[in-house]
Image: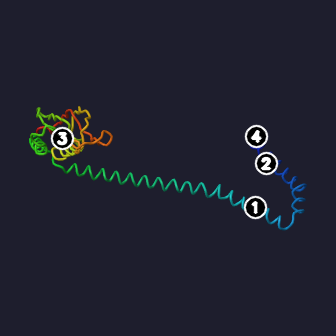
Amino acid sequence: MSPSASTSNLKTRARGLGRQLWASYGQARWQGLSASARLWVLVFIGFMGVWVFVSIAILPAMQTLNASERQREEVAQQVVQMRSLQQRAQELQKIKSLAREESLKSLESITPAGNPALQMTIQGDRVLVQLKNLPASQLAAWLAQARSNAQTLPDEVHITRAALPNAGVQAGVNTTGNSAKLSTAWDGQIILRLPKKP
């Protein structure tokens, strides 16, 4: 006997047993119920049927719909990011490459002369920048200008973090150790690479 035939045989037996139980017990009990009790049983069976239908047919579809909406939102965000990157890449392509001398002049123009916190030394196609207690905000602004105006990028970075007292401490204002705020500053050196000679 094949497995499908045995499964079919079991289903037939189960149906037959169900009919026998209903004929011997269920029908008699159903007949013995009052009209209002029968109505409540039918209402309960109806609610159960609706619940089963919603659980099987509607809830999975709603979950799939919600998941697809989230995926659409993620894809839309990725498209916006890709368009932004594409626009940025097109802008970078339009920028004219600077020669070494132009880059060096631009770098010197954004670097204040005689500032002990930020000193430059030219070494061929590289520029050694010495930092001494330079606030992080000034370093970030200077690096951004060096990248955009002089078209230079850091080749090597060797810096250590230092503590720079706030303006009140520098001015001699008495503050307790707990209330004195410290901002970040950097010591060390950065090596920038100039554009290659044309």
- Closest to the camera, between mark 4 and mark 2, is 2
User: Which residue is more in the foreground, 130 or 85?
Assistant: 130
User: Sequence order check: which comes first, mark 1 or mark 3?
Assistant: 1
Q: Mark 3 sits on what residue?
A: 152
User: Sequence order check: which comes first, mark 2 or mark 3?
Assistant: 2
Residues marked 3 and 4 touching at CB (< 8 Å): no
Q: How many marks?
A: 4
In three-dimensional space, the C-alpha distance between marks 2 and 3, rounded to whole angstroms, equals: 80 Å
Q: Mark 4 sits on what residue?
A: 2
Element type at marker 4? loop
User: Sequence order check: which comes first, mark 3 or mark 4?
Assistant: 4
Residues marked 2 and 1 touching at CB (< 8 Å): no
- Closest to the camera, between mark 2 and mark 3, is 3
Element type at marker 1? helix
User: Which amino acid, mark 1?
Assistant: Phe
Give the crowd class for mark 1: few <14, some 14-19, many >=20 residues within 10 Å: few
User: Sequence order check: which comes first, mark 2 or mark 1?
Assistant: 2
In three-dimensional space, the C-alpha distance between marks 3 and 4, rounded to whole angstroms, equals: 78 Å
User: Sequence order check: which comes first, mark 4 or mark 1?
Assistant: 4
Tell me: 116 left or right of 51.
left
User: Which amino acid, mark 2?
Assistant: Lys
- Closest to the camera, between mark 3 and mark 4, is 3
Element type at marker 3? loop
What's the mark number on residue 11? 2
Q: Mark 1 sits on what residue?
A: 44
Q: Quadrant of the N terminus?
A: top right
In three-dimensional space, the C-alpha distance between marks 4 and 1, rounded to whole angstroms, equals: 40 Å
The x, y position of residue 155, in whole percent, is 21, 34
* Residue occupying the far bottom of the picture: 35
